[in-house]
């Protein structure tokens, strides 16, 4: 909903499930490989395939995009084990517990990803 309410909703392509998203990315890669997303906002708890499995599938199917497309986990999970697991993937750059802050989307689109703290340090 935060994305839909933002002035930047046209910058996003939403898919209902992980399989549809992977299929869309495959078609996009075949048609225009230089036009791959910079960021993918990804929920961990999805039907049929969880977020971690999605990242594994993504990295397997699109190895040349591994260092170019970054994942922002958006989840209701407050479990430290999920956060630690997320940051085991080099392509995960942020872990947001829903709801997404209202200005997050605008900052992401206008300024690109910048975070004041190192979230990859999951010692807490």
Image (cartoon, helix red, strand yellow):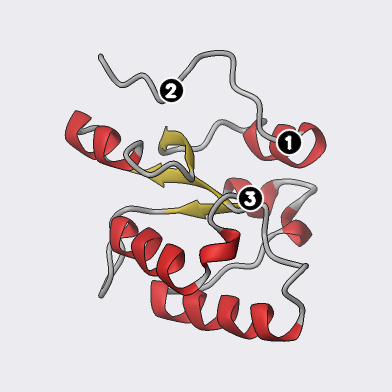
Q: Residue at x 57, y 81 (%)?
A: 26
Q: Which mark is residue 112?
A: 1
Would you name the residue on which mark 3 appears? Answer: 3
- Residue 79 in the image: x percent, y percent? 19, 33
Dot 2, crowdedness within 10 Å: few (<14), some or many (≥20)? some
SS for callout 1: loop
Q: Residue at x 45, y 54 (%)?
A: 42
Q: Quadrant of residue 102?
A: top right
CB contact under 8 Å: marks 2 and 3? no
Q: CA distance from mark 1 to mark 3?
A: 15 Å
- Residue 38 in the image: x percent, y percent? 67, 52
- Residue 19 in the image: x percent, y percent? 40, 79
Q: Quadrant of residue 9?
A: bottom right
Would you name the residue on which mark 2 appears? Answer: 119
Q: Residue at x 77, y 78 (%)?
A: 32
Left or right, residue 116 beside residue 94: right
Q: Indicate whether 116 appears above or below 26.
A: above
């Amino acid at each position: 909903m935060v994305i839909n309410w933002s002035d930047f909703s046209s910058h996003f392509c939403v898919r209902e499930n992980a399989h549809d998203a992977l299929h869309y990315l495959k078609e996009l890669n075949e048609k225009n490989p230089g036009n791959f997303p910079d960021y993918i906002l990804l929920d961990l708890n999805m039907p049929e395939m969880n977020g971690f499995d999605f990242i594994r599938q993504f990295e397997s199917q699109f190895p040349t995009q591994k260092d170019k497309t970054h994942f922002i986990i958006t989840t209701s999970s407050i479990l430290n084990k999920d956060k630690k697991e997320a940051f085991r993937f080099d392509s995960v750059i942020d872990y947001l517990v829903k709801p997404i802050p209202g200005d997050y989307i605008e900052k992401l689109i206008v300024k690109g990803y910048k975070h004041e703290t190192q979230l990859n340090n999951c010692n807490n």
